Amino acid sequence: MKSKPERGRDEPQKIAKSRISTSFSGSQLFSMGGGVKHSKLVSFATVGFWSLIAIFTLAGCETTTTGIMQGVTEGEAVMFQYSQDIFENDGTLQVTMPSGERFTGKFVQASTTSTEDAYIYGDIFDDDDDDFGSVHSSETTMSSKSTAILIGNQGNSMECRFQFSSPEVGIDGGGVGHCETSFETRIDIIF
């Protein structure tokens, strides 16, 4: 007569390990070629996502930048103040002219978006080269050009054109530009 094996102290650990391994086996259904490369890619993407969350949390969730642009009109200094969200391609501008008129408005950085489909052949799921797949991707390219419209508190308007030094950074990367008021005053700007 065979006796039943005794359950030792290691039994709960064995049960826990088997539950862990079965919970991960479901994710391998979505893997390619055994799950190694795809699982690592997902892991790196997850780590990257949470790293960004941690950076913004540590930075106090500050996503808006502010700065000053120096301008000159008819020999007098004009200072522009700007504000821009780092995730956007637009922002606000404020300026007070030497005459005392205050202008406020918005600038927008131009961009283009291109899309592309890529087709993949090979041994994605097994060792024979008869598998097929496609990948759809889109890419947004920021332009170095930006336009702004400002409205004055005395009924005038101002149109500005900027050339950014670093399009991927936007206005914070610096550049040059000029503005024209509705009363035909030109302001040359450097930032």
Image (cartoon, helix red, strand yellow):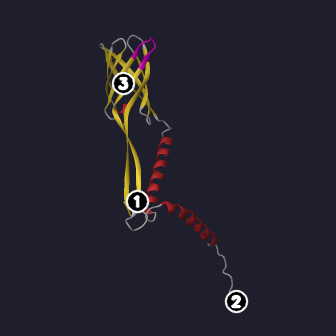
Q: 85 left or right of 170?
A: right
Task: Give how far apart the Cα atoms at labels 3 and 1 are.
Answer: 53 Å
**Percent of width and height locating residue 133:** 41, 57
Q: 64 left or right of 165?
A: right
Q: Name the residue under label 2.
A: 1
The label number, if any, that marks residue 69 in the structure image: 3
Above or below residue 51? Residue 85 is above
Neighbourhood count class around disc 1 (C-alpha, 10 Å): few under 14, some 14–19, many 20 upward: few
**Percent of width and height locating residue 138:** 40, 44
Q: Which amino acid does label 2 sit on?
A: Met
Helix, strand or loop status at disc 2: loop
Tell me which label, 3 or 1, sits earlier in the chain: 3
For this rendering, which residue is in front, 100 or 90?
90
Evaluate whether residue 29 shows in this view.
yes
Asked whether the residues under the numbered discs 3 and 1 touch, taking CB atoms below 8 Å apart as contact, a structural biologist would say no
Q: Which amino acid does label 3 sit on?
A: Met
**Percent of width and height locating residue 132:** 40, 59
For this rendering, which residue is in front, 163 or 17?
163
**Residue 153 among magenta residues:** yes
- Give the magenta part as a residue range: 150-157
